[in-house]
Each structure stands twice: as structure tokens, then as C-alpha cells.
Amino acid sequence: MTEPATFQDIADNLSFLDDWEDRYRYLIELGQALPKLDEAEKSEANRVRGCVSQAWLSAEASKRDGLTILTYRGESDAMIVQGLVAILLALYSGRPAHEIADTDAIAIFDELGLREHLTAQRSNGLVAMVNRMRSEGEALR
């Protein structure tokens, strides 16, 4: 993969993968396709609290057509979490702040069957990332 997939592409691909091992491999591939963060972005302010592994989310706000748009970059030192970051970026990045605040990624992950095989720690980290992104969206509504 040379460029990150869209969220719909990811959802479509996951629907074809019945075996959880195949889904894990796909998550890893998604994570490997993400560009690395600059070292300056791996700051304490960008670190996601609630993740057992190291994970960082960097948000940049801009204006378009009178709306605040949030663009995210992210990285983790754990392969599966990096894949989860890739899916969250595909879902949230480049969208208006109010849409980010209103989109329940946890429900979407549950619909896709992505949380049922995650460890409790990974699931907690996913929730922490989603809560942070939605809070940022809410703050910039």
C-alpha cells in the first residue's frame, strides 16, 4: 500500500475478511502505509493517555467554507495499534470538527467486528484515541 486507504475502502475490505488472523494482517498493512510522524510530533502533548503502547495523535485545524476542518496524523509503536490509528485517521481526518464530534467510531468499530478480538488494553487505547479526537472536534465545533 502506498497511500492510506479511505474509510469506505477499509470497511469494504474488512467485510471480505472472515478470519481474524487475516484482519490482523490487514490492520498491520494499514498501519505500515501510514507516514511516520516527525520526532517533534511525538511530544507529550500529542501522546494518547490510556494506551498501554506508545501512541501519538497530532491535529491541525484549518478553515474551509466557514467550517473548522481537523486533519490528523498519528503513529504508534505497536503494529496493531498503528493499524487502529490508520482506521481512525481514515474515518476522522479531513472532516469538519462537528462531524468528528458527532461520529461514534466505537459503534462503527463494533459494527465492523473490529473490537471483539482486541485485548482489553487495545480496546481501552482505542476508546482513549476516539474520545480525544471527538473532544477536539467538540471543542472546535
Image (cartoon, grey):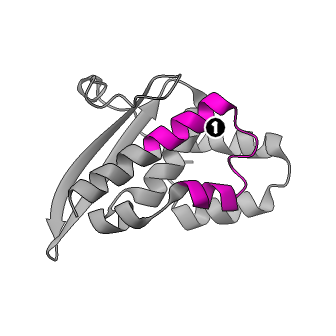
Q: Quadrant of residue 66?
A: bottom left
Q: Secondary structure at mark 1?
A: helix
102 displayed left or right of 78:
left
- Depth check, front residue: 8 or 129: 129
> Which residue corresponds to the image point at 43% horizontal and 33% vertical from the top-left?
75
Q: Where 132 sits versus 96, above or below?
A: above
Q: Which residues are magenta?
A: 106-129
Instruction: Kindly identify the residue that appears in the image at 80 percent across and 55 percent down.
Output: 17
> Could you classify mark 1 by the number of other residues whose Cα lies within 10 Å: few (under 14), some (14-19), or many (20 or more)?
some
The answer to whether residue 117 is magenta is: yes
- In this rendering, position of residue 52 left or right of residue 47: right
- What residue occupies the far bottom of the structure in this picture? 65
- The image quadrant that residue 29 belongs to is top right
Residue at image location 27% in from the left, 45% down from the top: 59
Q: Residue at x 56, y 25 (%)?
A: 78
Helix, strand or loop: magenta stretch = helix
